[in-house]
Image (cartoon, helix red, strand yellow):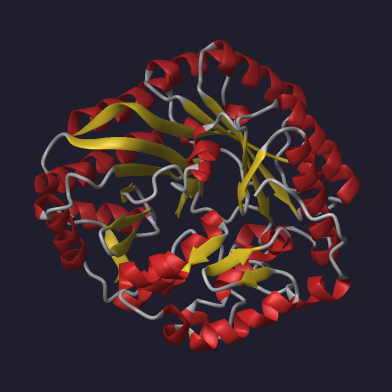
């Protein structure tokens, strides 16, 4: 869907959807993981991947979490460790190697990997030699296929052209820049000051070195932002011309994330202002030639993400939208989340606990979930809405052996209310998210979330607009 609604969004609709809800980087969402999911369960999932008939057909992705940052960004909800002591990285890399060894002991050496992402924290906290050590370790244990997507999150304040040479040498072909906002006053309010000129110079240097794709992360809803000030940031990003843009709504959850307590609530834009920022940003990016991939994400038409959208291969995983429609994901490092088969798992969230498990010679998995038949069915519906903006009844019925309208009778009744508001259209073939509905697609997906039907306490989630 490459258009933006022309009609203004009513205040009533804004008020109705000024509620909390999941981002659906997975279904069920990570807050549903349970400690009853054990290391034994994770081990069994890995063994099934190794021996299962479909094992060779499933691609494999790797996510490596580097938790360290030199300075604190007040908005951040990531698992991070603020430190200027770079000597903490060396033992962390040793433990990552132990964790990889545990995986290869079951999967064997040389598993084919088509997607790798280093996130954080700030992966560029690692020195060039430490990044080499990490990539050498991964290559000894996995086969990083030619033509794969190998990306790293970059803090523009911690990297220069010479470090880009190292990243290119190590095989990274995609960079993700944390921009958030170019406005100096907004940057000061969230303790992340980085001049636009610095980011532009870095992007130019990356293109000179042949990186295939640059992603720019933006956040709307930060303190002191206005629709007018954010429009100026959007114009600068369009001038920067990254291949991908991730446009996130700020999730203010100070009761869960202590750094956010430094942000004054009165400085946070209203729901109406946030919708205005979203609407104007969408219109601007699309007018500039970007494809609206779906919630959060835009891409140039030539980028693999936009191509996957056109070809119906788009998927959503714990890092957001992905070009791989069905893959296993091994999460390495503290707090990392993985998906193996019909299971999700998460590692220990503190370094002490993570190190302790690996010292015992065991995986650091502390919770997870084995998906039920109903979970898999609803995941297919929710991901169809989030990724393609539609659900075709027949395809779901054939894949899951159900009668859609009968199985989801209550949900279809609730969906009619959204249809009356112009957010979805329903016919004999399926459900289609409308142009207006894309603003509230998380609210549409929530209709099919069985866990939310039995638990109306949503304060742990961000607002859906």
Task: Establish if 321 lies above or below 389.
Answer: above
User: Residue 54, how many percent across, how many down?
Assistant: 17, 52
Q: Which of 345 and 382 is in front in this view?
A: 382
Residue displayed at 13% across by 46% down: 107
User: Residue 463, how many percent across, how many down?
Assistant: 68, 68
Q: In this view, does 31 lie to the left or right of 331?
A: right
User: Residue 70, how many percent across, how many down?
Assistant: 56, 38
In the current view of this chain or complex, which residue is farthest to the right?
Answer: 228
Q: In this view, does 139 lie to the left or right of 280?
A: left
In the current view of this chain or complex, which residue is farthest to the front?
Answer: 428
Q: Which of 435 and 215 is in front in this view?
A: 435
Residue 243: image quadrant is top right
Residue displayed at 53% across by 69% down: 430
Task: Establish if 351 lies above or below 406.
Answer: above
Q: Nearer the viewer, residue 247 or 298?
A: 298
Residue displayed at 42% across by 74% down: 32
Q: In this view, does 142 lie to the left or right of 463?
A: left
Q: In this view, does 149 lie to the left or right of 59?
A: right
Q: Nearer the viewer, residue 374 or 41?
A: 374
Q: Is residue 266 visible?
A: no
Task: Establish if 364 lies above or below 157.
Answer: below
Task: Establish if 14 lies above or below 348.
Answer: below
């Amino acid at each position: 869907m490459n258009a933006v609604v022309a009609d203004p969004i009513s205040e009533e609709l804004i008020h109705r959807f000024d509620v909390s809800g999941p981002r659906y980087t997975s279904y069920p969402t990570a807050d549903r993981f349970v400690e009853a999911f054990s290391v034994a369960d994770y081990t069994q999932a890995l063994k099934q991947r190794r021996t299962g008939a479909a094992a060779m057909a499933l691609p494999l992705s790797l996510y490596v979490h580097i938790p360290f940052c030199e300075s604190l960004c007040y908005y951040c909800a990531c698992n991070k460790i603020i430190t200027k002591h770079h000597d903490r990285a060396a033992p962390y890399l040793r433990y990552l190697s132990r964790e990889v060894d545990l995986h290869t002991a079951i999967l064997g050496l040389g598993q084919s990997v088509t997607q790798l992402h280093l996130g954080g924290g700030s992966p560029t906290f690692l020195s060039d030699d430490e990044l080499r050590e990490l990539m050498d370790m991964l290559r000894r244990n996995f086969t990083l296929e030619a033509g794969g997507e190998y990306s790293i999150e970059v803090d523009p304040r911690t990297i220069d052209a010479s470090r880009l040479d190292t990243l290119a040498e190590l095989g990274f072909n995609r960079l993700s820049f944390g921009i958030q906002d170019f406005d100096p006053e907004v940057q000061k309010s969230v303790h992340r000051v980085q001049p636009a000129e610095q980011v532009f110079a870095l992007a130019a240097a990356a293109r000179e070195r042949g990186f295939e794709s640059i992603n720019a992360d933006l956040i709307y809803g930060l303190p002191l932002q206005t629709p007018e000030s954010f429009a100026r940031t959007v114009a600068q990003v369009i001038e920067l011309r990254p291949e991908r843009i991730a446009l996130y709504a700020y999730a203010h959850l100070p009761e869960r994330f202590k750094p956010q307590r430094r942000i004054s609530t009165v400085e946070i834009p209203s729901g109406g202002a946030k919708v205005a920022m979203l609407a104007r940003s969408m219109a601007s990016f699309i007018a500039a030639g970007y494809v609206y991939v779906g919630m959060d994400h835009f891409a140039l038409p030539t980028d693999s993400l936009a191509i996957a959208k056109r070809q119906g291969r788009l998927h959503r995983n714990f890092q957001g939208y992905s070009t791989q429609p069905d893959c296993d994901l091994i999460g390495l490092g503290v707090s990392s989340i993985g998906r193996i088969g019909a299971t999700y798992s998460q590692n220990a969230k503190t370094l002490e606990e993570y190190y302790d498990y690996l010292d015992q010679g065991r995986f650091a998995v502390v919770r997870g979930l084995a998906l039920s038949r109903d979970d898999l069915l609803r995941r297919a519906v929710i991901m169809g809405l989030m990724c393609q903006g539609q659900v075709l009844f027949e395809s779901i019925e054939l894949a899951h052996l159900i009668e859609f309208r009968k199985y989801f009778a209550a949900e279809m009744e609730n969906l009619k209310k959204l249809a009356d508001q112009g957010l979805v259209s329903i016919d004999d073939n399926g459900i289609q998210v409308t142009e207006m509905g894309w603003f509230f697609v998380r609210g549409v997906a929530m209709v099919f979330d069985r866990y939310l039907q039995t638990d109306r306490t949503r304060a742990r989630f961000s607002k859906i607009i």
